[in-house]
Amino acid sequence: MQTLWNQKTHEEKRMFTRRAALMGAALVAATPYVIKTALADQVGDTSAAAPADLSALVRRKVKLVAPPFVHAHEQVATTGPQIIEFEMKIIEKEVQIDKDAWLQAMTFNGSMPGPMMVVHEGDYVELTLFNSPDNMMQHNIDFHAATGGLGGGSLTLVNPGEKTVLRFKATRPGVFVYHCAPGGPMIPWHVVSGMSGCIMVLPRAGLKNHLGQSVSYDRVYYIGENDLYIPRGENGAYMRFTDPGESYSDTLAVMNGLIPSHVVFNGRVGALTGDNALTAEQGETVLFVHSQANRDTRPHLIGGHGDLVWDTGKFNNPPERDLETWFVRGGSAGAALYKFLQPGVYAYVNHNLIEAVNLGATAHVIVGGDWNNDLMEQVVAPVEYDAAHEGRTALP
Ligand SMILES: [Cu+2]
């Protein structure tokens, strides 16, 4: 299949993709009984539903920005519910994820993760989703924040060159994953190829602490974590492919072993370190939103804490306080609020430290300000000691 795929014309690839996706859909239906497919088609048909009258609502267009940044938004809504219009384009492209490793990535809007959307509870999200004509694959979007229709997945399946518009009402406040889910084995493959992102549905009155008092943030950063499965060739080097179709079977073999070759924040090793480090100032409160569409993770801010943490990511639940590490379940997003008290370079990691250090899941936050010796002081700098006389009182 791999060589054949390369010999196909663009049109043939499109047809192939369509057929593969249909096969995927058939697998999802998993039919021992044919009648079940018919029933599923019947109940999944939305064409006869009464139209929703939203003519009284104001529409607002919001341009999405690439993570870790988030588009400008109000924390406390100053209007009633609106229809918030977003656009996203699906782009398949090769991405270098480490010095020696490349991924045939599938992306929402060209980034891994896809952009974070922010709306308020009661708003309507209206997304125009474009599948670039340069792509090979059929894609869609499943919003965990949405109700019905496979989170929108059953209503948004687009071929290369097609667009679709989905509207859903944001009824539950929290941070929620969205991801591509085009059916069958395409689902995990597209997700571990980069197709996930996050939406934050803020309560209209903004965030509240454990006592129900209002809290706000000075900055918000969106960290999307990806587990990646890059196959190695016979010479031990990572394999590089010309297109997603060619990469599929070798990648699937690694995926099914459940051991990622890379675990990264924002698409590649080092995406949020060095010149790309996150920044903040002493005294600022930062909201870290962390999503993982496929696999569990455990964010930890080295040298800091989570002052208020919604580790399940849902703002109707009171936040936990003073956490050292929090847990984000695969297929969800979490949010942690922290006020930086001390300047310095903080590492924000997945505290499986093998994943953080050896596989890539590390970000840095550079915080400017004045050191507070009350919180911490280096009383004696490292110095050689007199082993004949000192250190004898330490042991029991
Ligand atoms: Cu997809």
Image (tube, grey):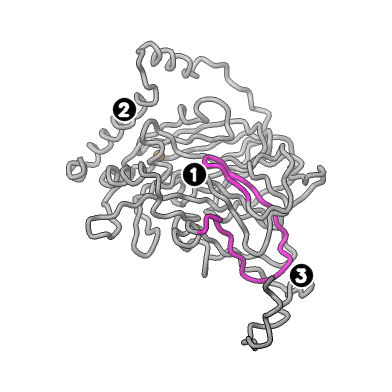
Q: Position of residue 176 (x, y in %)?
A: 58, 40
User: Distance from label 3 to label 1 (Cα)?
Assistant: 36 Å
Instruction: Name the element at disc 3.
Output: loop
According to the image, label 3 marks what residue?
Answer: 375
Name the residue: 37% across, 49% down.
Answer: 229
Q: Nearer the viewer, mark 1 or mark 2?
A: 1
Question: Dot 2, crowdedness within 10 Å: few (<14), some or many (≥20)?
Answer: some
In the image, residue 287 lies in the stretch drawn in magenta:
no
Residue in the foreground of this view, choosing between 354 and 393: 393
Kind of residue at disc 1? Arg
Q: Position of residue 88 (x, y in %)?
A: 48, 43
Please tell me which of labels 3 and 1 falls first in the chain.
Answer: 1
User: Distance from label 1 to label 2 (Cα)?
Assistant: 25 Å
| Image: magenta residue range | 326-353
In the image, residue 350 lies in the stretch drawn in magenta:
yes
Q: Residue 23: which numbered mark, if any?
A: 2
Kind of residue at disc 3? Leu
Q: Residue 295: which numbered mark, if any?
A: 1
Q: Position of residue 275 (x, y in %)?
A: 52, 69
Number of labelled discs? 3
Question: Dot 3, crowdedness within 10 Å: few (<14), some or many (≥20)?
Answer: few
